[in-house]
Image (spheres, grey):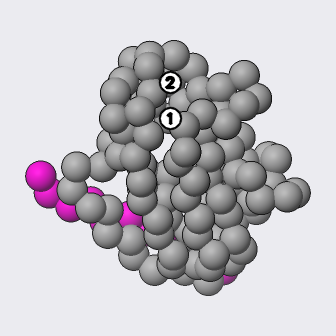
Amino acid sequence: MPLVVLAACGGGESAPETTVPAGVDLVVKAVSTIRWDASSYSAPAGEIDVFLANDDNVNHVLVVLQDDKVVGDLELEVKKRGDTDQGTITLEPGEYRIYCSTPGHGSMNSTLTVS
C-alpha cells in the first residue's frame, strides 16, 4: 500500500510534511485555531488504525467518545508541531466523536461514522 504525504497550505508557519504509514484506516490532523482538519470522518467497523498528526503549535490529546463517554483505551497525544502518534481502537458500526481532551479544546469535536 503506498504512503500518503500530507502538507499544510495557508499562511503563517508551514507544517512539516507528514508521512502516513501504510495500512492506516483513519487520519486526523490537529490544525491551527484549535480544531481538527475535518468536521466529520469515516472508518470501517472493527479494528481501526488511527494516525494523528499535529500541524498546530500546542498539545492535543485525541480520544473517541460515544454518548459523551470515552470509548476504548485509545489516547493519542501530540505535543508540538510535527509530532505524530498512532494507535488502534475496535469500534462497532455507529456514530462516535473524535474529541480533544486537552482543557479548553472542546471545539475539537468532530463526528466519526463507523460502518
Q: Nearer the viewer, residue 40 or 70?
A: 70
Q: Quadrant of residue 104?
A: bottom right
Is residue 44 placed above or below 39 in the rendered structure?
A: above
Q: Which mark is residue 41?
A: 1
Q: Position of residue 77 (x, y in %)?
A: 59, 65
Residue visible at 21% across and 56% down in the picture:
22
Visible residue check, residue 71? yes
Q: Are marks 1 and 2 in contact (CB under 8 Å)?
A: yes
Inspect the magenta stretch and tell me whether residue 9 lies in it. yes
Which percent across, then down, holds residue 69? 72, 31
At label 1, which amino acid type do we have? Tyr
Of residues 88 and 10, the one nearer the viewer is 88
Q: Earlier in the sequence, mark 1 or mark 2?
A: 1
**Drawn side of residue 46 relative to residue 9, left or right:** left
Q: Residue at x 51, y 78 (%)?
A: 82
Query: Helix, strand, or loop for circle 1?
Result: strand
At which x and y percent is residue 45?
Answer: 36, 24
Screen quadrant of the C terminus: top left
Which residue type carries mark 2?
A: Thr
Q: Nearer the viewer, residue 24 or 72?
A: 72
Looking at the picture, tell me which residue is in the foreground, 55 or 100. Answer: 100
Q: Is residue 13 above or below residue 90?
A: below
Which residue range is magenta in the image? 1-12
Instruction: Kindly identify the residue that appears in the image at 82 percent across and 47 percent down.
Output: 106
Is 101 within the magenta? no
Q: Position of residue 27 (x, y in %)?
A: 42, 50
Image position of 11 with respect to 106: above or below: below
Question: What whole-number distance in Å separates the C-alpha atoms at marks 1 and 2?
Answer: 6 Å
User: Farthest left residue?
Assistant: 1
Residue at the spot of label 2 = 113
Look at the picture and state if 50 lies above or below 6: above
